[in-house]
Protein backbone atom coordinates (compact mmCIF):
# COMPACT_ATOMS: atom_id res chain seq x y z
CA UNK A 1 0.00 0.00 0.00
CA UNK A 2 1.19 3.50 -0.79
CA UNK A 3 1.49 6.41 1.59
CA UNK A 4 -1.35 8.45 0.08
CA UNK A 5 -5.07 8.00 -0.42
CA UNK A 6 -8.04 9.91 -1.75
CA UNK A 7 -10.27 11.81 0.66
CA UNK A 8 -12.88 14.54 0.61
CA UNK A 9 -11.12 17.83 1.27
CA UNK A 10 -12.44 21.35 1.90
CA UNK A 11 -10.94 24.17 -0.14
CA UNK A 12 -9.35 26.74 2.22
CA UNK A 13 -10.26 24.55 5.22
CA UNK A 14 -13.90 25.64 5.43
CA UNK A 15 -16.63 26.92 3.19
CA UNK A 16 -19.89 26.28 1.31
CA UNK A 17 -20.82 22.99 -0.27
CA UNK A 18 -18.93 23.95 -3.43
CA UNK A 19 -15.68 23.83 -1.43
CA UNK A 20 -15.90 20.03 -1.16
CA UNK A 21 -13.66 18.07 -3.51
CA UNK A 22 -11.70 14.82 -3.61
CA UNK A 23 -7.93 15.18 -3.19
CA UNK A 24 -4.85 13.08 -2.52
CA UNK A 25 -3.85 13.20 1.15
CA UNK A 26 -1.51 11.22 3.43
CA UNK A 27 -2.83 7.84 4.49
CA UNK A 28 -3.35 7.68 8.28
CA UNK A 29 -0.71 5.96 10.41
CA UNK A 30 -1.82 3.27 12.83
CA UNK A 31 -1.78 4.11 16.53
CA UNK A 32 -1.91 1.76 19.48
CA UNK A 33 -4.72 -0.84 19.28
CA UNK A 34 -5.97 0.51 15.98
CA UNK A 35 -7.09 -0.97 12.68
CA UNK A 36 -6.69 0.52 9.23
CA UNK A 37 -10.04 0.06 7.50
CA UNK A 38 -10.53 0.31 3.74
CA UNK A 39 -13.84 2.13 3.52
CA UNK A 40 -16.74 0.88 1.40
CA UNK A 41 -19.36 3.42 2.53
CA UNK A 42 -19.73 6.30 4.97
CA UNK A 43 -22.70 8.02 6.57
CA UNK A 44 -23.42 11.74 6.57
CA UNK A 45 -24.45 13.63 9.70
CA UNK A 46 -25.51 17.19 10.38
CA UNK A 47 -22.30 17.91 12.27
CA UNK A 48 -20.48 17.35 8.97
CA UNK A 49 -22.25 20.39 7.53
CA UNK A 50 -21.25 22.48 10.53
CA UNK A 51 -17.66 21.25 10.44
CA UNK A 52 -17.45 22.04 6.72
CA UNK A 53 -18.50 25.61 7.53
CA UNK A 54 -15.95 25.92 10.34
CA UNK A 55 -18.64 25.89 13.05
CA UNK A 56 -17.93 22.52 14.69
CA UNK A 57 -14.70 22.04 16.67
CA UNK A 58 -12.88 18.79 15.96
CA UNK A 59 -11.79 16.88 19.09
CA UNK A 60 -8.07 17.26 19.91
CA UNK A 61 -5.97 14.82 17.93
CA UNK A 62 -8.81 13.80 15.59
CA UNK A 63 -8.53 13.77 11.82
CA UNK A 64 -9.60 17.00 10.15
CA UNK A 65 -11.25 14.93 7.42
CA UNK A 66 -15.05 14.91 7.69
CA UNK A 67 -17.09 11.91 8.77
CA UNK A 68 -17.40 9.70 11.84
CA UNK A 69 -19.24 6.54 10.70
CA UNK A 70 -18.30 4.02 8.05
CA UNK A 71 -18.25 0.41 6.87
CA UNK A 72 -15.42 -1.48 5.20
CA UNK A 73 -12.77 -4.18 5.50
CA UNK A 74 -9.76 -4.31 7.80
CA UNK A 75 -6.62 -3.76 5.73
CA UNK A 76 -4.07 -3.72 8.55
CA UNK A 77 -3.82 -4.07 12.33
CA UNK A 78 -1.40 -2.47 14.79
CA UNK A 79 1.03 -4.71 16.66
CA UNK A 80 -1.50 -5.05 19.52
CA UNK A 81 -3.68 -7.11 17.18
CA UNK A 82 -7.43 -7.37 16.85
CA UNK A 83 -8.44 -6.47 20.38
CA UNK A 84 -11.00 -8.29 22.49
CA UNK A 85 -13.05 -9.12 19.38
CA UNK A 86 -10.08 -10.86 17.76
CA UNK A 87 -10.37 -8.98 14.48
CA UNK A 88 -8.24 -10.10 11.55
CA UNK A 89 -7.18 -8.53 8.29
CA UNK A 90 -9.97 -8.91 5.75
CA UNK A 91 -12.77 -8.84 8.33
CA UNK A 92 -15.88 -6.92 7.31
CA UNK A 93 -16.73 -4.25 9.88
CA UNK A 94 -18.50 -0.99 10.57
CA UNK A 95 -17.60 1.56 13.18
CA UNK A 96 -17.42 4.97 14.82
CA UNK A 97 -14.45 7.35 14.70
CA UNK A 98 -13.64 10.88 15.84
CA UNK A 99 -13.19 11.91 12.20
CA UNK A 100 -11.71 10.78 8.90
CA UNK A 101 -14.51 8.68 7.37
CA UNK A 102 -14.82 10.63 4.09
CA UNK A 103 -11.75 8.80 2.79
CA UNK A 104 -10.48 5.58 1.26
CA UNK A 105 -8.86 4.55 4.55
CA UNK A 106 -9.39 5.32 8.23
CA UNK A 107 -7.36 4.47 11.34
CA UNK A 108 -9.68 3.65 14.23
CA UNK A 109 -9.64 1.92 17.60
CA UNK A 110 -10.51 -1.76 17.35
CA UNK A 111 -12.87 -1.26 20.31
CA UNK A 112 -15.04 0.99 18.14
CA UNK A 113 -15.47 -1.60 15.39
CA UNK A 114 -18.40 -4.00 15.01
CA UNK A 115 -18.53 -7.07 12.79
CA UNK A 116 -20.76 -6.51 9.76
CA UNK A 117 -23.72 -8.93 9.82
CA UNK A 118 -24.33 -10.78 6.58
CA UNK A 119 -27.99 -9.71 6.78
CA UNK A 120 -27.10 -6.03 6.30
CA UNK A 121 -25.61 -4.12 3.38
CA UNK A 122 -22.51 -1.94 3.47
CA UNK A 123 -24.75 1.09 3.10
CA UNK A 124 -27.01 0.12 5.99
CA UNK A 125 -24.06 -0.56 8.29
CA UNK A 126 -22.40 2.76 7.45
CA UNK A 127 -25.47 4.57 8.79
CA UNK A 128 -25.71 2.78 12.14
CA UNK A 129 -22.91 3.87 14.51
CA UNK A 130 -23.31 7.61 15.07
CA UNK A 131 -27.08 7.47 14.73
CA UNK A 132 -27.95 4.62 17.05
CA UNK A 133 -25.23 5.31 19.60
CA UNK A 134 -26.31 8.96 19.86
CA UNK A 135 -29.94 7.91 20.38
CA UNK A 136 -28.89 5.40 23.05
CA UNK A 137 -26.75 8.00 24.81
CA UNK A 138 -29.52 10.62 24.76
CA UNK A 139 -32.16 8.22 26.08
CA UNK A 140 -30.28 6.32 28.74
CA UNK A 141 -27.09 8.01 29.87
CA UNK A 142 -28.39 11.57 29.66
CA UNK A 143 -32.18 11.33 29.76
CA UNK A 144 -32.45 8.57 32.35
CA UNK A 145 -34.97 6.55 30.34
CA UNK A 146 -36.66 3.57 31.98
CA UNK A 147 -39.61 1.39 31.08
CA UNK A 148 -42.92 3.15 31.66
CA UNK A 149 -41.67 6.67 30.91
CA UNK A 150 -43.00 8.89 28.14
CA UNK A 151 -40.63 10.41 25.60
CA UNK A 152 -40.81 12.87 22.72
CA UNK A 153 -38.35 13.05 19.83
CA UNK A 154 -38.15 16.25 17.80
CA UNK A 155 -37.20 16.04 14.09
CA UNK A 156 -39.02 12.73 13.70
CA UNK A 157 -37.49 11.81 10.34
CA UNK A 158 -33.92 12.56 11.37
CA UNK A 159 -31.75 9.48 11.60
CA UNK A 160 -31.23 9.84 15.36
CA UNK A 161 -34.96 10.17 16.05
CA UNK A 162 -35.73 7.25 13.74
CA UNK A 163 -33.43 5.18 15.95
CA UNK A 164 -34.73 6.72 19.17
CA UNK A 165 -38.41 6.15 18.45
CA UNK A 166 -37.75 2.48 17.76
CA UNK A 167 -35.54 2.09 20.83
CA UNK A 168 -38.18 3.76 23.01
CA UNK A 169 -40.90 1.42 21.81
CA UNK A 170 -38.74 -1.69 22.12
CA UNK A 171 -37.78 -0.79 25.68
CA UNK A 172 -41.35 -0.29 26.89
CA UNK A 173 -41.95 3.44 26.93
CA UNK A 174 -45.52 4.03 28.03
CA UNK A 175 -45.90 6.40 25.07
CA UNK A 176 -43.62 7.74 22.33
CA UNK A 177 -44.29 11.06 20.59
CA UNK A 178 -42.56 12.96 17.82
CA UNK A 179 -42.63 16.27 15.99
CA UNK A 180 -41.79 17.31 12.45
CA UNK A 181 -42.37 20.22 10.09
CA UNK A 182 -44.16 18.19 7.42
CA UNK A 183 -47.29 16.03 7.54
CA UNK A 184 -45.55 13.28 5.57
CA UNK A 185 -42.82 13.03 8.21
CA UNK A 186 -45.39 12.93 11.01
CA UNK A 187 -47.22 10.14 9.22
CA UNK A 188 -43.90 8.35 8.74
CA UNK A 189 -43.21 8.51 12.49
CA UNK A 190 -46.55 6.91 13.34
CA UNK A 191 -47.01 4.39 10.52
CA UNK A 192 -43.42 3.32 9.90
CA UNK A 193 -41.80 3.81 13.30
CA UNK A 194 -44.72 3.17 15.63
CA UNK A 195 -44.91 6.48 17.48
CA UNK A 196 -48.13 6.94 19.47
CA UNK A 197 -48.53 10.42 18.05
CA UNK A 198 -46.66 12.92 15.88
CA UNK A 199 -47.35 16.64 15.63
CA UNK A 200 -46.67 19.13 12.85
CA UNK A 201 -44.85 22.08 14.39
CA UNK A 202 -45.79 24.41 11.53
CA UNK A 203 -49.55 23.76 11.46
CA UNK A 204 -50.31 22.58 15.01
CA UNK A 205 -49.66 23.84 18.51
CA UNK A 206 -47.57 20.83 19.36
CA UNK A 207 -47.38 21.67 23.06
CA UNK A 208 -51.18 21.65 23.31
CA UNK A 209 -51.29 18.34 21.46
CA UNK A 210 -48.72 16.82 23.81
CA UNK A 211 -50.62 17.99 26.87
CA UNK A 212 -53.88 16.56 25.49
CA UNK A 213 -52.20 13.23 24.79
CA UNK A 214 -50.69 13.04 28.28
CA UNK A 215 -53.70 14.25 30.31
CA UNK A 216 -51.86 17.53 30.96
CA UNK A 217 -48.91 15.78 32.58
CA UNK A 218 -46.39 16.45 29.82
CA UNK A 219 -43.67 14.05 28.74
CA UNK A 220 -40.88 12.69 30.94
CA UNK A 221 -38.09 13.10 28.37
CA UNK A 222 -37.71 15.41 25.38
CA UNK A 223 -34.84 14.88 22.93
CA UNK A 224 -34.27 18.15 21.11
CA UNK A 225 -32.08 19.15 18.16
CA UNK A 226 -33.64 22.58 17.65
CA UNK A 227 -32.42 24.62 20.60
CA UNK A 228 -33.41 28.22 21.25
CA UNK A 229 -36.58 28.47 19.16
CA UNK A 230 -38.12 25.47 20.99
CA UNK A 231 -36.74 26.34 24.43
CA UNK A 232 -40.01 27.74 25.80
CA UNK A 233 -42.19 25.07 24.24
CA UNK A 234 -39.97 22.33 25.63
CA UNK A 235 -40.34 23.80 29.12
CA UNK A 236 -44.11 23.97 28.63
CA UNK A 237 -44.33 20.35 27.43
CA UNK A 238 -41.99 18.68 29.92
CA UNK A 239 -43.46 16.80 32.88
CA UNK A 240 -42.53 17.27 36.52
CA UNK A 241 -39.03 15.94 37.20
CA UNK A 242 -38.60 15.60 33.43
CA UNK A 243 -35.39 15.90 31.42
CA UNK A 244 -34.86 17.93 28.25
CA UNK A 245 -31.86 16.58 26.33
CA UNK A 246 -30.44 19.09 23.86
CA UNK A 247 -28.29 17.73 21.04
CA UNK A 248 -28.25 20.63 18.58
CA UNK A 249 -29.08 24.21 17.65
CA UNK A 250 -30.98 24.02 14.36
CA UNK A 251 -33.26 26.77 15.72
CA UNK A 252 -30.49 29.02 16.97
CA UNK A 253 -28.56 29.60 20.18
CA UNK A 254 -30.16 32.80 21.51
CA UNK A 255 -33.25 32.24 23.66
CA UNK A 256 -36.08 34.64 22.63
CA UNK A 257 -36.77 37.66 24.82
CA UNK A 258 -39.60 37.01 27.25
CA UNK A 259 -38.79 33.33 27.78
CA UNK A 260 -40.25 32.13 31.09
CA UNK A 261 -37.84 29.83 32.93
CA UNK A 262 -39.98 29.37 36.03
CA UNK A 263 -40.70 25.79 34.96
CA UNK A 264 -37.25 24.81 36.16
CA UNK A 265 -38.49 25.33 39.72
CA UNK A 266 -42.21 24.63 39.28
CA UNK A 267 -41.58 21.34 37.51
CA UNK A 268 -38.17 20.50 38.97
CA UNK A 269 -37.12 19.76 35.40
CA UNK A 270 -33.61 19.48 34.01
CA UNK A 271 -32.14 20.87 30.79
CA UNK A 272 -28.90 19.19 29.77
CA UNK A 273 -26.80 19.54 26.65
CA UNK A 274 -24.75 16.67 25.35
CA UNK A 275 -22.61 15.51 22.45
CA UNK A 276 -21.10 12.15 21.56
CA UNK A 277 -18.02 13.15 19.57
CA UNK A 278 -16.40 14.98 22.49
CA UNK A 279 -16.58 11.92 24.77
CA UNK A 280 -13.55 9.75 25.45
CA UNK A 281 -13.10 6.30 23.98
CA UNK A 282 -14.05 4.50 27.20
CA UNK A 283 -17.42 6.28 27.25
CA UNK A 284 -18.03 5.69 23.54
CA UNK A 285 -16.86 2.11 23.86
CA UNK A 286 -19.48 1.30 26.48
CA UNK A 287 -22.14 2.64 24.13
CA UNK A 288 -20.68 0.59 21.29
CA UNK A 289 -20.96 -2.52 23.47
CA UNK A 290 -24.57 -1.66 24.29
CA UNK A 291 -25.28 -1.31 20.57
CA UNK A 292 -23.85 -4.76 19.90
CA UNK A 293 -25.72 -6.43 22.75
CA UNK A 294 -29.02 -4.60 22.51
CA UNK A 295 -29.60 -3.41 18.95
CA UNK A 296 -27.54 -5.62 16.65
CA UNK A 297 -29.74 -8.73 17.10
CA UNK A 298 -32.78 -6.59 16.23
CA UNK A 299 -31.11 -5.31 13.07
CA UNK A 300 -30.42 -8.87 12.00
CA UNK A 301 -33.97 -10.15 12.44
CA UNK A 302 -35.67 -7.00 11.18
CA UNK A 303 -37.27 -5.82 14.41
CA UNK A 304 -35.33 -2.57 14.05
CA UNK A 305 -35.66 -0.87 10.68
CA UNK A 306 -32.74 0.88 9.02
CA UNK A 307 -33.84 3.71 6.75
CA UNK A 308 -31.37 4.74 4.06
CA UNK A 309 -32.96 7.58 2.12
CA UNK A 310 -30.31 8.10 -0.55
CA UNK A 311 -27.09 6.41 -1.66
CA UNK A 312 -24.64 8.40 -3.79
CA UNK A 313 -21.12 7.73 -5.04
CA UNK A 314 -18.69 9.85 -3.07
CA UNK A 315 -17.82 11.76 -6.22
CA UNK A 316 -21.24 13.39 -5.66
CA UNK A 317 -20.39 14.54 -2.13
CA UNK A 318 -21.61 18.07 -2.88
CA UNK A 319 -25.05 16.72 -3.83
CA UNK A 320 -25.07 14.59 -0.68
CA UNK A 321 -24.45 17.64 1.52
CA UNK A 322 -27.18 19.56 -0.32
CA UNK A 323 -29.65 16.78 0.48
CA UNK A 324 -28.93 17.19 4.19
CA UNK A 325 -29.17 20.97 3.97
CA UNK A 326 -32.63 20.74 2.36
CA UNK A 327 -34.05 18.76 5.33
CA UNK A 328 -36.19 16.63 3.04
CA UNK A 329 -34.76 13.21 3.81
CA UNK A 330 -36.27 10.44 5.92
CA UNK A 331 -33.27 8.54 7.21
CA UNK A 332 -29.62 8.40 6.23
CA UNK A 333 -27.71 9.77 3.29
CA UNK A 334 -24.84 7.40 2.48
CA UNK A 335 -21.88 7.74 0.13
CA UNK A 336 -20.08 4.75 -1.39
CA UNK A 337 -16.44 4.46 -2.43
CA UNK A 338 -15.53 2.24 -5.38
Image (cartoon, rainbow, N blue to C red):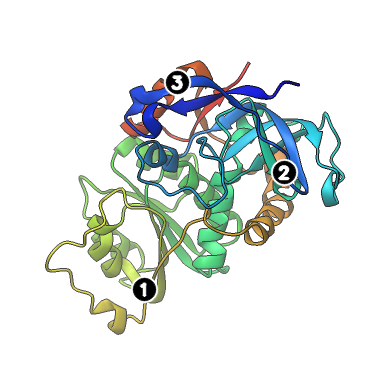
Pick the residue in front: 68 or 29.
Answer: 29
Q: Is residue 262 above or below residue 223?
A: below
The residue singled out by tag 2 in the image is 113
Pick the residue in front: 145 or 198.
Answer: 145
- Which residue is located at x 37 percent, y 38 percent? 185
Percent coordinates x, y for residue 32 in the rendering: 76, 49
The residue singled out by tag 3 in the image is 21
- Which residue is located at x 40 percent, y 47 percent? 56
Q: Choose the circle earlier in sequence order: 3 or 2.
A: 3
The dot on residue 239 is 1
Q: Choose the circle earlier in sequence order: 1 or 3.
A: 3
Q: Nearer the viewer, mark 1 or mark 3?
A: 3
Q: Quadrant where the C terminus lies? A: top right
Label 2's element? strand
Q: Quadrant of residue 123?
A: top right
* Dots 1, 3 in contact, CB < 8 A: no
Marks 3 and 2, Cα distance to the nearest angstrom? 27 Å
Q: Nearer the viewer, mark 2 or mark 1?
A: 2
Mark 1 closeness class: few <14, some 14–19, many ≥20 residues within 10 Å: many
Amino acid sequence: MGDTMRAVDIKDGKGPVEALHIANVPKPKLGKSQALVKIKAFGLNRMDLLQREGMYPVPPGASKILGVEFSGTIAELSEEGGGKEGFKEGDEVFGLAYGGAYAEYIAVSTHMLVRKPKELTWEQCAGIPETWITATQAMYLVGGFAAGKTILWHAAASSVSIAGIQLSRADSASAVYATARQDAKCEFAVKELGANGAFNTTSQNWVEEVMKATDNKGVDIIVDFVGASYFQQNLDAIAKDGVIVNLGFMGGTKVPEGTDISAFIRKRCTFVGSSLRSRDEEYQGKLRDQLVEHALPRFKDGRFKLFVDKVLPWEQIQDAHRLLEENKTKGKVICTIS
